[in-house]
Image (cartoon, grey):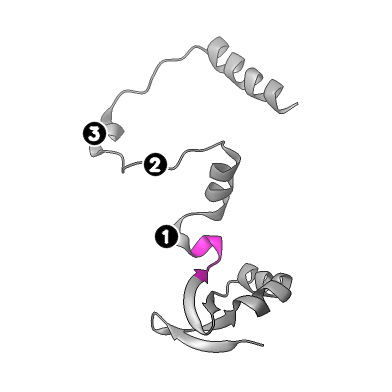
Amino acid sequence: MAIVAIWGGSLVRSVNIATLKNRLSVYLKLVREGEELVVRDRNRPIARIVPLGVVDGVDPDELALVALGHLRPPEAPLPESFWTMPAPKVSRRRSMAAFASVREDRV
């Protein structure tokens, strides 16, 4: 199948491009199950495929929402003062209108 290599202090599966291309669904199944893959070009490591949940500790559901355009990732952490600011006052009618407009877009 593939060569097991040491990458960042742990054992990971390593695969050449041609093998990855020919058996992509097999390797993607391994990634879905939590394994990392090192991709090689003529036995030289060139890339790493990691499960979404492993990437920078970001929730995979959040990444899916970003990919759909429903969520923007933060540009910087929130300042501590954010948590002491008063909540905005929005009327129930405006809130319901906003929800209704979103639902209309999805239908």
**Mark closer to the chain start, 3 or 1:** 1
Asked which quadrant contains residue 7, the reply is: bottom left
Please tell me the numbered disc located at residue 81. Answer: 3
Mark 3 or 1: in front is 1
At x 49% / y 87%, what residue is drawn? 5
Return the residue nearer the eye: 7 or 89: 7
Q: Is residue 25 left or right of residue 63?
A: right
Position of the C terminus, as image quadrant, is: top right
- Residue 65, given in percent of the width and then of the height, sits at 57, 43
Q: What element carries label 2?
A: loop
Distance from the alpha carbon under mark 3 to that under mark 1: 25 Å
Q: Is residue 23 visible from the viewing direction of this image?
A: no
Tell me, for residue 56, which label it has, or none.
1
Indicate the amino acid at tag 1. Answer: Asp
Name the quadrant containing residue 21.
Answer: bottom right
Which badge, 2 or 1, comes first in the chain's sequence?
1
Quarter of image, res 49: bottom right
Q: Which residue is drawn at 57% across and 75% down?
A: 35
How would you rate the neighbour count of disc 3 (Cα within 10 Å): few for under 14, some for 14-19, many for 20 or more? few
Q: Is residue 53 magenta?
A: yes
- At a point 38% along the width and 19% down the height, the residue shown is 88
The residue at which mark 2 appears reads as 74
**Secondary element at tag 3:** helix
Residue 95 is one of the magenta-drawn residues: no
Is residue 23 shown left or right of residue 55?
Answer: right
The magenta segment: 48-54
> Of callouts 2 and 3, which one flags the residue occurring earlier in the amino acid sequence?
2
Disc 2 versus disc 3: distance between alpha carbons? 16 Å
